[in-house]
Amino acid sequence: MSRIDSACWLGPYPFRHVPHHDADGLLRWMDRHEISQAVVSSLPAAFHRDPQPANTELARWVAAHRDRLIPCATLHPHFPGWRRDLKRCSEDLQMRGLRLFPKHAGFSLTDPHTLELVRSASELGWHTAIPIRLEDRRGRHWMDTALEVTLAEIADLARRVPESELLVIDALGVENSAFVRDPSLSGARVGFEVSRMATVLQKSVPQLLDRLGPDRLFFGTGMPLKVGGAGVLKLDLLQTSDENRALIAGANIRRLLRQAGEP
């Protein structure tokens, strides 16, 4: 079974030392956990007013490892020139998705600029990934934001851009959210990365398998911000069919990447 990590990062983090944050370091961790490929974005880009230089740097970091590291762009919908930068990320830098950080960059997921950016990414065949958070706010640096993206905000975005593929990174509490309770979202094109969920105790992942199906669940680790073994163990302990496990482990994220032209 091929594991494809849908939620990895490259680059230094401003609030603490993160080991193995370069491409070689991440690849060593991937080999240790038998992960064949990883979708990555620039960690510094989340904190930049203009994230495009960080996107260019990310492309350089992964250039020698494009068979295993699949880059996603970070863009700010209120920064002038994002349309030009989106085009360059797609055509010149060969990126295959978008990641947004509304709480770090200070924008709403449903303002007109963001909606235009998400729709423009969708026209390229890209999915849009939205991390709920980067760090647990209980241990955050005093200069870091304590705000987290809510599932209600993502549900509002999904209602406004039903044609777009959305991926919620570091998702939690989905089994009690509108994505389960609201029939109008039953067919929403929203997937959930499961590294923060429980497989055994609260059984969040088994519940979502029953309620949403395997097509909307995605394997991820959050490396190098997180210890990768935890995400792998949750997948290994999940009691489900081999077919469902293969979808979560890699087939679902591969489907999204193929829409963006990734072989």
Image (cartoon, grey):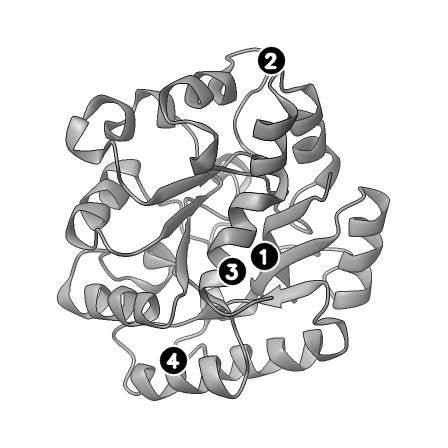
Q: Residue at x 32, y 81 (%)?
A: 82
Q: Earlier in the sequence, mark 2 or mark 3?
A: 2
Q: Residues within 10 Å of mark 3 (few under 14, many from 20)?
A: some
Amino acid on which the number 3 mark rests in the picture: Leu
Q: Earlier in the sequence, mark 1 or mark 3?
A: 1
Q: Position of residue 34 (x, y in %)?
A: 81, 44
Measure the alpha-carbon separation of dots 3 and 4: 17 Å
Amino acid on which the number 2 mark rests in the picture: Val
Q: Which residue is mark 4?
A: 86
Q: Is residue 144 above or below residue 126?
A: above
Q: Is residue 148 visible?
A: no
- The quarter in which the N terminus is drawn is top right
2 vs 3, front mark: 3
3 vs 4, front mark: 3
Q: Earlier in the sequence, mark 4 or mark 2?
A: 4
Q: Earlier in the sequence, mark 2 or mark 1?
A: 1
- Residue extending furthest toward the top: 201
Tag shown at residue 257: 3
